[in-house]
Amino acid sequence: MFQYLGKRIGTFLTQLGQITLLAGHACRHIVLRPHVGQVFEQMYRLGVKSLPITTVTALFIGLAFALQVVQEFLKFGAGKMIGGIVALALWRELGPLLTAVVVAGRVGAAIAAELGTMKVTEQVEALEAMGQDPVRYLVAPRLAASTLMMPLLVGWADVVGFFGGFIIAIGSGRVNPYMYFESAQAMLHVKDIMGGLVKGVFFGFFIALISAYMGLSAKSGAKGVGEVTTRAVVVSLIVIFVLNYFLSTALFT
Amino acid sequence: MIELRNVSKSFDGRMVLHDVNLTIQTGERIAIIGTSGCGKSTLLRLIMGLHAPDAGEVLIFGEDIHRVSHARLLKIRLKIGILFQSAALFDSMNVAANVAFPLIENFNIPAARVIDRVAQKLELVEMSGFGEHDPADLSGGQRKRIGLARALSGDPEVMLYDEPTTGLDPILSTNIEDLIVRLSRQLKVTSIVVTHQISTILRTADKIYMMHNGTLLEPESPETIMTATSIYGEFIRGGLS
């Protein structure tokens, strides 16, 4: 029992050390010798191509959340606060968190599967053999692109979700459009908007880092690639939820 | 040119190479044979600097590649080309982009010259006209040829071939073997072929080494290996039977 636990803790600490080294190595390349072409390509692949799924998710989250809020708040005659509550919930928590979940599923899985396949088919070794550093060519651009694009996706999701809430609020026939925006303006501060975007930066960084690490540690053919892809998404989701709590504590309390 | 001195390497506690010594002169064409999993590919990866030895030195052009800086190692690697067992073509790029990749990333060459060089290398491996194809659309033999063109695009002084004919039909194998010999003669490239294919050994090498129990045995020539009574003979006859 103790031996098993000790082994698991040892493995966890080793992986934590390796992932920290990978982060340091990749960040050095991003700052000192970025592969600009690859960064732009990854910004398109990871960011722009995530727009449709982010839009749909954010719109329906906004609709569903406003549906609950509108019903309950109108019961208590607090219709004036609906816009503000929807805006606060979206900008502070729902927007960053749900965008990160969607991106972890789409982008994290894609990074882990792509790098994992490259690893087991000797493409990563081929890169090294051709005088390229795989961290500079493969990891750093994905890390930079994900970190840069994630806050933009979060910002977009916030706006779309708020619009979804607006449709429900107005559809109820008991909320004035002007009132919806006015309460949002009164309750939402720059700190809330910036806090949500900062969360996006952290989420983007960790999704790409964890997924790239998992991909590069793939072994044993297709089965190995499948395993690291699953692990990349699961670990990314756990890290996102844990990190979200600490970031909310630091940014909003 | 290439020298391995007392090199040992183990994986997960299993000794794969034990006290290996090997010297290869410029322009030589050698084959390294042995059973599957005996450490032949590991030897190539040590020469390429993709694995670090547990003990010993790997000298390439007089420099111990496991003691030089990472930046220097990347420079040394540019003088060595490698054809991987799976060809290791980049799936995200077409054939021309694969061949052009080392030129674009490593050498400051104008685009027009890159295009010329790519065409020239594709012609060398008899794959002209395939530049726009995706690697996924090619057969195993074609992939190996493109892998070879890519490995040769930087005009390396040393070529490493990891199981270049494994899994290919006899006609394609012969084509690849002819190509290895032709390139070695035309471009004066030092060649190291790792294989367990008998025809490849006999047709591509001047000197044959066998890896057995983690060490390299004394070399044989293609002329004497067929009649050798040693472990070489057993391997070849086993392979032929």
Image (spheres, helix red, strand yellow):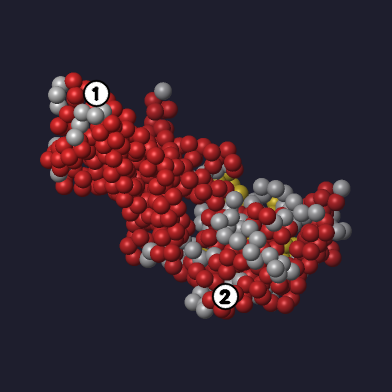
Q: In the displayed image of the protein, which residue is found farthest to the left?
A: A186
Judging from the image, what secondary structure is the residue with disc 2 in?
A: helix
In the shown orientation, is residue B130 left or right of residue A38?
right
Residue B111: x, y in percent? 53, 76
The quadrant of the picture occupied by the N terminus of chain B is bottom right
Residue B87: x, y in percent? 65, 57
In the shown orientation, is residue B171 left or right of residue A21?
right
| Residue A140, placed above or below residue A202 | below
Indicate which label's residue lies in the foreground, 1 or 2: 1
The residue that label 2 is drawn on is: B114
Residue kind at label 2, given as amino acid type: Val
Q: Quadrant of residue B137?
A: bottom right
Residue kind at label 1, given as amino acid type: Gln
Kindly identify the residue that appears in the image at 52 percent across and 79 percent down. Answer: B110
The residue that label 1 is drawn on is: A71
Kindly identify the residue that appears in the image at 82 percent across and 56 percent down. Answer: B170
Tell me the chain of label 2: B
- Viewer can see residue A93: no
Tell me the chain of label 1: A
Kindly identify the residue that appears in the image at 14 percent across and 27 percent down. Answer: A78
Residue B236: x, y in percent? 82, 53
Instruction: Report how many numbered discs are placed on residues in the image.
Output: 2
What is the spatial separation of the Cα atoms under label 1 and label 2, in whole angstroms?
66 Å
